[in-house]
Amino acid sequence: MAYISFFRYNSTVKNDTIYAIIGIPLDYGTTQEFGYTKEAPSIIRELSDHISLMTEREVYFNENLPLVDLGDIVINSNNIDSNNDQTNLNSNNTSFGKETKIYELKLMNNLVEQIKNKLKYIYKNLESSNLKENKRIPIFIGGNHLVTFPILKSLEEFQSLSNISVISLDAHLDFYDIWQGNKYQHCTVMKRIHELLKNYSNNKLVIIGTRDIDIEEFQNAKSSNFSNNYLNCYEIFKKSKIHNKNVSEVIFEFINNILKSDGDNPKTNKVYISIDIDIFDPSIAPATGYPIAGGLLYRDVLDLLEKLVNSYEIIGIDLVEYMPNLDFKNMMTGFLCTRLIQEIIGFLE
């Protein structure tokens, strides 16, 4: 099938462009072998050709919408062969950690450089002081959840991560330190991001919707003083019932409490949102590697995203862990992903 861009938008960034679709078809770092995320960006683009051009809020995806599709990052298989030299590096010359292996280092550096190049094209002709007035919002389609780390590393090039918080919607904590000898896996990504954000001030990492946490992750979160920064689905639904509030209200209040100022420091207002498709209950989004029962429903997530968009300055978004080869014939999960991205852009308009 010929290449189809997201809703057939072109790749020409103009002065009034705001939203930029970027695909990152990365499978490396996935801890199961039967599902593949690398086809997700192309499948989601294809599915955009089969849904209506208007969102629920009646935002019309026409030629006036300031959206571009910049294509995919190229994943170089030579950089991700796990049979390559696995000697641990002394990382005095790298920012990726002392235990980083050579092939992982090559992969991370390659991803960061390619994402930077895409972002340079997005931010071209914009002074850093004018980013807010002439905002660009990259929307990344993974790929597995590991992609969020090089995305944030790349964003460092264009703005400090101080005062920028990360909200991850995920069934998993992804807080392993090492997985089978590797630092950079989809199950270690939030541990890496937590470490990255510690280099800056006035930011937070918040994880919403967990319901499958291993004891090692639990202990890592506790030792990292992170135990109060995630909200599991059991607590979400319990608080919703006890306080007679809808699910999105419970989550939004939790996020606001976490993002409030510490002492006299100003409250963070900039937010990056990472959406792992397994945040959804598998009854509505089964095509992912670990479909954990008891997740959120589409309307819960949509309402939450609308609240976040209306309350914070969104600097970027990713959607990850969709595995098209595990989808039903009617592409149920794929259509959900496509529609979700469309609705988010509608909220941002």
Image (cartoon, grey):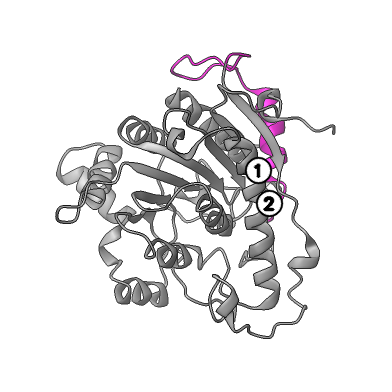
Give yes or no for residue 40 being in the magenta stretch. Answer: yes
Identify the residue at horizontal 39%, vertical 36% (top origin).
Answer: 305
Q: Quadrant of residue 196?
A: bottom left
Between 22 and 175, the one lying in front of the other is 22
Q: Amino acid at mark 2?
A: Gln
* Residue 209 in the image, given as x and y percentages of width and height: 37, 52
The answer to whether mark 2 and mark 1 are in CB contact below 8 A is: yes
Residue 147 covered by magenta stretch:
no
Cα separation between marks 2 and 1: 6 Å
Q: Which residue is mark 2?
A: 114
Q: Secondary structure at mark 2?
A: helix
Q: Which residue is mark 1?
A: 118
Is label 1 in a helix, a strand or a loop? helix
Residue 275, position as x, y percentages in the image: 48, 46
Q: Which contiguous range is marked in magenta?
A: 36-64
Q: Is residue 192 left or right of residue 112?
A: left
Viewer-proximal residue among 308 and 250 = 308
| Quarter placement of the C terminus | top left
Q: Residues within 10 Å of mark 1 (few under 14, many from 20)?
A: many
